[in-house]
Image (cartoon, grey):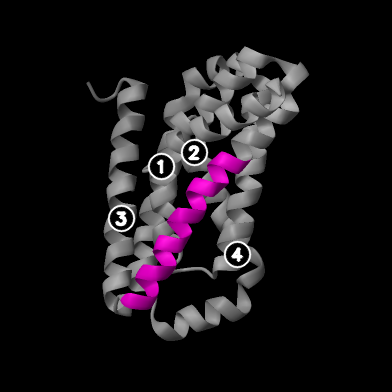
Amino acid sequence: MQLIVLFFSVLITEFIAEMGDKTQLMLVGLTSQYKIRDITIGTLVAILFLNALAVLAGGFLNQVLAKWLWVVKLVAAAAFIYFAITSLLKTDDEEEEAGESKISFAPLAVFSTFFMAELGDKTQLTAVTFGATYGLAKALIVWAACVVGFFAADILGMLAGILLKKKAPERAMKIFSFVLFMVFGVMTAIEALKLSGMLG
Protein backbone atom coordinates (compact mmCIF):
# COMPACT_ATOMS: atom_id res chain seq x y z
CA MET A 1 0.00 0.00 0.00
CA GLN A 2 2.83 2.38 0.88
CA LEU A 3 4.52 1.67 -2.46
CA ILE A 4 1.27 2.44 -4.33
CA VAL A 5 0.91 5.75 -2.47
CA LEU A 6 4.56 6.54 -3.21
CA PHE A 7 4.16 5.68 -6.90
CA PHE A 8 1.12 7.91 -7.45
CA SER A 9 2.44 10.79 -5.35
CA VAL A 10 5.67 10.85 -7.41
CA LEU A 11 3.72 10.40 -10.67
CA ILE A 12 1.35 13.29 -9.97
CA THR A 13 4.16 15.58 -8.79
CA GLU A 14 6.23 14.86 -11.91
CA PHE A 15 3.18 15.32 -14.17
CA ILE A 16 2.43 18.74 -12.65
CA ALA A 17 6.11 19.77 -12.82
CA GLU A 18 6.22 19.03 -16.56
CA MET A 19 2.92 20.74 -17.44
CA GLY A 20 3.64 23.96 -19.30
CA ASP A 21 7.38 23.30 -19.24
CA LYS A 22 9.48 24.22 -22.28
CA THR A 23 10.11 20.59 -23.24
CA GLN A 24 6.38 19.88 -23.32
CA LEU A 25 5.79 22.92 -25.53
CA MET A 26 8.85 22.00 -27.61
CA LEU A 27 7.10 18.79 -28.65
CA VAL A 28 4.32 20.88 -30.18
CA GLY A 29 6.90 22.42 -32.50
CA LEU A 30 8.60 19.10 -33.26
CA THR A 31 5.36 17.67 -34.67
CA SER A 32 5.80 19.97 -37.67
CA GLN A 33 9.20 18.41 -38.45
CA TYR A 34 8.99 14.74 -37.49
CA LYS A 35 6.53 11.87 -37.52
CA ILE A 36 4.75 11.15 -34.25
CA ARG A 37 6.42 7.72 -34.08
CA ASP A 38 9.90 9.26 -34.17
CA ILE A 39 8.98 11.92 -31.61
CA THR A 40 7.49 9.30 -29.30
CA ILE A 41 10.55 7.03 -29.50
CA GLY A 42 13.05 9.86 -29.06
CA THR A 43 11.10 11.43 -26.20
CA LEU A 44 10.49 8.15 -24.37
CA VAL A 45 14.15 7.09 -24.54
CA ALA A 46 15.24 10.53 -23.33
CA ILE A 47 12.74 10.41 -20.44
CA LEU A 48 13.82 6.89 -19.45
CA PHE A 49 17.48 7.88 -19.49
CA LEU A 50 17.07 11.29 -17.84
CA ASN A 51 14.99 9.93 -14.98
CA ALA A 52 17.37 7.01 -14.47
CA LEU A 53 20.22 9.50 -14.13
CA ALA A 54 18.23 11.73 -11.81
CA VAL A 55 16.87 9.05 -9.48
CA LEU A 56 20.11 7.07 -9.19
CA ALA A 57 22.36 10.07 -8.78
CA GLY A 58 20.04 11.92 -6.40
CA GLY A 59 21.37 15.11 -4.90
CA PHE A 60 24.91 14.36 -6.13
CA LEU A 61 23.92 14.93 -9.76
CA ASN A 62 22.63 18.40 -8.96
CA GLN A 63 25.94 19.35 -7.30
CA VAL A 64 28.00 18.08 -10.23
CA LEU A 65 25.88 19.90 -12.81
CA ALA A 66 25.72 23.15 -10.87
CA LYS A 67 29.13 24.39 -12.07
CA TRP A 68 28.62 23.51 -15.74
CA LEU A 69 24.88 24.00 -16.07
CA TRP A 70 25.39 27.17 -18.12
CA VAL A 71 27.26 25.18 -20.82
CA VAL A 72 24.40 22.66 -21.01
CA LYS A 73 21.90 25.50 -21.30
CA LEU A 74 23.97 27.17 -24.04
CA VAL A 75 24.03 23.95 -26.09
CA ALA A 76 20.26 23.62 -25.60
CA ALA A 77 19.79 27.23 -26.77
CA ALA A 78 21.78 26.50 -29.94
CA ALA A 79 19.60 23.42 -30.58
CA PHE A 80 16.41 25.45 -30.19
CA ILE A 81 17.62 28.15 -32.59
CA TYR A 82 18.72 25.52 -35.11
CA PHE A 83 15.26 23.93 -35.06
CA ALA A 84 13.67 27.37 -35.39
CA ILE A 85 15.63 28.16 -38.56
CA THR A 86 15.22 24.73 -40.17
CA SER A 87 11.48 24.60 -39.43
CA LEU A 88 10.96 27.91 -41.26
CA LEU A 89 13.32 27.30 -44.20
CA LYS A 90 12.33 23.72 -45.08
CA THR A 91 10.33 23.38 -48.30
CA ASP A 92 7.67 20.72 -48.83
CA ASP A 93 10.04 18.75 -51.12
CA GLU A 94 12.82 18.86 -48.53
CA GLU A 95 10.44 17.65 -45.83
CA GLU A 96 9.39 14.67 -47.97
CA GLU A 97 13.02 13.90 -48.83
CA ALA A 98 14.04 14.21 -45.17
CA GLY A 99 11.20 11.89 -44.21
CA GLU A 100 12.44 9.27 -46.68
CA SER A 101 16.22 9.50 -46.26
CA LYS A 102 16.74 10.55 -42.66
CA ILE A 103 13.84 8.87 -40.87
CA SER A 104 16.16 6.52 -38.96
CA PHE A 105 17.96 9.54 -37.48
CA ALA A 106 14.82 11.44 -36.48
CA PRO A 107 14.39 9.72 -33.06
CA LEU A 108 18.05 10.49 -32.31
CA ALA A 109 17.55 14.15 -33.22
CA VAL A 110 14.49 14.35 -30.96
CA PHE A 111 16.32 12.50 -28.18
CA SER A 112 19.34 14.86 -28.34
CA THR A 113 17.24 18.03 -28.37
CA PHE A 114 14.92 16.84 -25.61
CA PHE A 115 17.82 15.53 -23.50
CA MET A 116 19.83 18.76 -23.65
CA ALA A 117 16.76 20.92 -23.06
CA GLU A 118 15.61 18.93 -20.04
CA LEU A 119 19.01 18.30 -18.42
CA GLY A 120 19.09 20.25 -15.17
CA ASP A 121 15.52 21.50 -15.65
CA LYS A 122 12.93 21.59 -12.86
CA THR A 123 11.26 18.33 -13.89
CA GLN A 124 14.53 16.44 -13.71
CA LEU A 125 15.47 18.15 -10.46
CA THR A 126 12.13 16.97 -9.08
CA ALA A 127 13.22 13.42 -9.90
CA VAL A 128 16.61 14.14 -8.30
CA THR A 129 14.84 15.21 -5.11
CA PHE A 130 12.71 12.06 -5.02
CA GLY A 131 15.80 9.93 -5.66
CA ALA A 132 17.69 11.58 -2.84
CA THR A 133 14.69 11.33 -0.48
CA TYR A 134 13.85 7.65 -0.96
CA GLY A 135 17.30 6.27 -1.80
CA LEU A 136 18.31 3.27 -3.89
CA ALA A 137 15.96 0.91 -2.01
CA LYS A 138 12.96 2.50 -3.73
CA ALA A 139 14.78 3.81 -6.81
CA LEU A 140 12.95 1.51 -9.24
CA ILE A 141 9.44 2.55 -8.21
CA VAL A 142 10.43 6.23 -8.05
CA TRP A 143 11.98 5.97 -11.52
CA ALA A 144 8.89 4.24 -12.96
CA ALA A 145 6.56 6.86 -11.46
CA CYS A 146 8.72 9.71 -12.76
CA VAL A 147 8.78 8.22 -16.26
CA VAL A 148 4.99 7.68 -16.40
CA GLY A 149 4.18 11.16 -15.03
CA PHE A 150 6.73 12.86 -17.28
CA PHE A 151 5.68 11.00 -20.44
CA ALA A 152 1.95 11.48 -19.76
CA ALA A 153 2.45 15.26 -19.68
CA ASP A 154 4.52 15.19 -22.86
CA ILE A 155 1.95 13.04 -24.66
CA LEU A 156 -0.44 15.97 -24.20
CA GLY A 157 2.15 18.21 -25.85
CA MET A 158 2.42 15.85 -28.81
CA LEU A 159 -1.37 15.58 -29.16
CA ALA A 160 -1.67 19.37 -29.13
CA GLY A 161 0.95 19.52 -31.89
CA ILE A 162 -0.89 16.95 -34.00
CA LEU A 163 -4.18 18.82 -33.57
CA LEU A 164 -2.57 22.11 -34.59
CA LYS A 165 -0.90 20.45 -37.56
CA LYS A 166 -4.25 19.11 -38.82
CA LYS A 167 -6.25 22.28 -38.22
CA ALA A 168 -3.73 25.02 -38.99
CA PRO A 169 -2.33 25.86 -42.47
CA GLU A 170 1.14 24.42 -43.07
CA ARG A 171 2.78 27.86 -43.41
CA ALA A 172 1.20 29.02 -40.14
CA MET A 173 2.50 25.87 -38.43
CA LYS A 174 6.03 26.58 -39.68
CA ILE A 175 5.87 30.16 -38.39
CA PHE A 176 4.48 28.95 -35.06
CA SER A 177 7.33 26.42 -34.74
CA PHE A 178 9.90 29.08 -35.65
CA VAL A 179 8.60 31.54 -33.05
CA LEU A 180 8.30 28.83 -30.39
CA PHE A 181 11.84 27.54 -30.86
CA MET A 182 13.35 31.02 -31.16
CA VAL A 183 11.70 32.16 -27.92
CA PHE A 184 13.01 29.07 -26.11
CA GLY A 185 16.43 29.52 -27.72
CA VAL A 186 16.77 33.15 -26.63
CA MET A 187 15.38 32.47 -23.15
CA THR A 188 17.72 29.50 -22.64
CA ALA A 189 20.71 31.48 -23.93
CA ILE A 190 19.94 34.33 -21.49
CA GLU A 191 19.61 31.80 -18.68
CA ALA A 192 22.98 30.28 -19.66
CA LEU A 193 24.70 33.68 -19.70
CA LYS A 194 23.25 34.52 -16.29
CA LEU A 195 24.47 31.22 -14.84
CA SER A 196 27.95 31.79 -16.29
CA GLY A 197 28.13 35.28 -14.75
CA MET A 198 28.48 36.97 -18.15
CA LEU A 199 25.07 38.58 -17.80
CA GLY A 200 24.01 40.24 -14.57
| Rendering coords of residue 115 (x, y %) | 55, 43
131 in relation to 160, above or below: above
Q: Which mark is residue 19?
A: 1
Q: Amino acid at mark 3?
A: Leu
Q: Amino acid at mark 4?
A: Asp
Q: Is residue 37 left or right of residue 3?
A: left
Per the model, the C-alpha gap separating discs 1 and 4 is 21 Å
First to last magenta residue range:
148-167
Q: Earlier in the sequence, mark 1 or mark 3?
A: 1
Asked whether 159 falls inside the magenta stretch, the response is yes
Q: Nearer the viewer, residue 11 or 92?
A: 11
Q: Secondary structure at mark 2?
A: helix
* Residue at point 60%, 80% (across, down): 100
Q: Which mark is residue 180?
A: 3
Given this view, does label 4 or label 2 mark the residue nearer the observer?
2
* Residue at point 36%, 31% (across, down): 192
Q: Secondary structure at mark 4?
A: helix
Per the model, the C-alpha gap separating discs 2 and 3 is 22 Å
Per the model, the C-alpha gap separating discs 4 and 2 is 22 Å
* Residue at point 51%, 25% (across, down): 125
Crowding around mark 3 (Cα neighbors within 10 Å: few <14, some 14 to 19, many 20+) is many
Q: Which mark is residue 56?
A: none
Q: Amino acid at mark 1?
A: Met
| Residue at the spot of label 2 | 15
